[in-house]
Image (tube, rainbow, N blue to C red):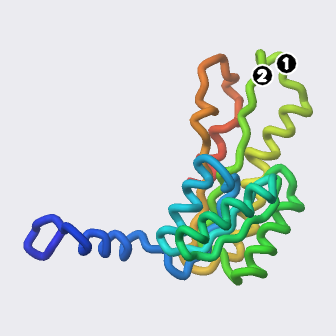
Amino acid sequence: MTGNGGPMTGNRAGDAASDLFGLAGQVAVVTGGSRGIGRAIAAGFAEAGADVVIASRKLGNCAAAAAEISASTGRTAVGVEFHAGHWADCDRLIEVVYREFGRCDVLVNNAGMSPLYPDLASVTEEYYDKVQGVNLKGPFRLGVLAGTRMSGAGAAASSTSARSARCGPVPTNSSTPAPRPASTR
């Protein structure tokens, strides 16, 4: 809005949005950032002025996404191989972020999995542990590591995919994927 109560238009509207949503000088880490929703989030942060770290299981995909985002935005983008279900990878990711940038202002726990299974009785302990490791253990560990080192008004968020919202019986004590967003409130 302008001082006279009317809407802002043209460049003034864009400038106001940049002032409100600009991330210049910030560092954003996006897990699962090499494709899909995560890649769009990483690109959006870079377009808003942030340097980005793209973390995912396949280093080649991370490097390609980082190169494309950097080329299109002029921001620094770094790809890091990372498995959300492995605490050692969480530790290494945060160390890389602080070694490369000296800070982490935004953490987006986007990596996750919700593979299909024929029925609940077919879910094995190994399968269950794998899903919980990626969807809960990794985001928890990253939130702890990044959160304890963030200064000022850092932010962490977790996201879920629309793929996880499929119809079918779900046990009432299920913690996948609902606790991820709830854990960041």
Q: Is residue 77 above or below residue 113?
A: below
Q: Callout 2 environment at 10 Å: few (<14), some (14 to 19), or many (20+)? A: few
Residue under numbered circle 1: 122
Q: Is residue 116 above or below residue 95?
A: above
- Mark 1–mark 2 Cα distance, whole angstroms, equals 7 Å
Q: Earlier in the sequence, mark 1 or mark 2?
A: 2
Residue 2: percent from the left, percent from the top?
A: 15, 73
Residue at x 74%, y 25% (from the top left corner): 116
Q: Which mark, by number, is residue 117?
A: 2
Residue at x 72%, y 54% (from the top left corner): 139
- Which one is nearer the viewer's eye here, 167 or 44? 44
Residues under numbered marks 1 and 2 in contact, where contact means CB atoms less than 8 Å apart: yes
Residue 21: percent from the left, percent from the top?
A: 41, 69
In the picture provided, is 10 more to the left or to the right than 183?
A: left
Q: Which mark, by number, is residue 81?
A: none
Disc 2 residue type? Answer: Tyr
Q: Secondary structure at mark 1?
A: helix
Residue at x 71%, y 34% (from the top left corner): 114
- Which one is nearer the viewer's eye here, 23 or 75? 75
Q: Is residue 91 above or below residue 150?
A: above
Q: Secondary structure at mark 2?
A: loop
Q: Is residue 171 above or below residue 1?
A: above
- Asked which quadrant contains residue 123, the reply is top right
Q: Residue furthest left?
A: 4
Which quadrant of the rendered structure holds the C terminus? bottom right
Disc 1 residue type? Answer: Ser
Which quadrant of the rendered structure holds the N terminus? bottom left
Residue at x 74%, y 63% (from the top left corner): 63
Give the mark toward the camera: 1 or 2. 2
- Asked which quadrant contains residue 174, the reply is top right
